[in-house]
Amino acid sequence: MPDLIVVRHGETEWSLSGQHTGTTDIPLTERGERQARELLDNFGEREFAKVLVSPRQRARRTAELAGIDDFEIDEDLVEWDYGELEGVTTAEYNERREAEGRGSWNLWTDGAPGGESAEDVAARVDRVIARTERLRESGDVLVVGHSHLSRMLVVRWLGLPARYGENFLLDAAHWAVLGHKRGAPVVKHWGVPPHA
């Protein structure tokens, strides 16, 4: 069965600083644009049955700079809605919680206050996987999205609970290939940088 290729958008100012970037629609940095131009260089002449892209400009621009002319916007590919954590780093939020006498926070188990839980994001990702399953009957499908969303994609692909997304890291402008081996879902490649 054809593969699902998962791409994280190129670098932004907030991906560089570690700030949670869900609903804020910020552009790529100059480095992020260079990363995007090189992103699919080592894919050769591979063609995709379909390309699905998050509506955020950082994902759309990554697809465009990677040379993808024909793609479809998929609202389910937006990044986690971080609610109160939008624009805040995990360290800043945990420092605030400790000052209030509360314990440390974990996105994967606690969800985003005022935003989405891991189960909310998992439900969106499950819909993406179901759509790509139908599309992959015609060939490989590429999705261009975001950090935490891509991590959720891999765990749901593998049939794992949402909280295990914490254990997968996908840097800006890196990609992964999800496929099957003897009928079982597998990770063929993970965290491949541009020009690998």
Image (spheres, helix red, strand yellow):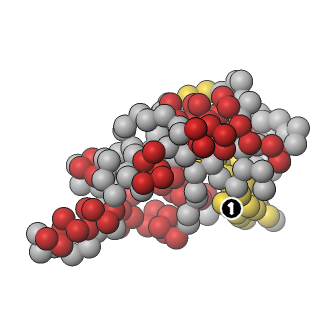
Picture coordinates of residue 78, whole percent (x, y): 46, 40
* Residue farthest toward the front in the current orientation of the protein: 30
Check the image and report above or below for 14 versus 152. above
Amino acid type, residue under disc 1 in the picture? Trp
Residue matched to label 1: 190
Front residue of 172 and 125: 172
Compared to residue 183, the image places residue 134 above or below, namely above
User: In the image, residue 195 lies at what x, y percent?
Assistant: 78, 51
Q: Nearer the viewer, residue 146 or 30?
A: 30
Q: Residue furthest left?
A: 100
Residue at image position (37%, 51%) is 20
In this rendered view, identify the residue nearer to me: 183 or 125. 125
**Residue at the location (31% across, 47% down)?**
86
- Quadrant of the rendered image containing residue 190: bottom right
**Mark 1, secondary structure of its residue:** strand
Residue at the farthest top position:
69
Whether residue 135 is visible here, answered yes or no, is: no
> Residue 36's x, y, as percent?
66, 40
Residue drawn 34% across and 58% down? Answer: 89
Q: Residue at x 39, y 44 (%)?
A: 22
Residue 153 placement (x, y as % from top left) = 56, 54
**Residue 9 against residue 196 in the figure, above or below:** above
Label 1 Cα neighbours within 10 Å, binned few <14 / some 14-19 / many ≥20: some
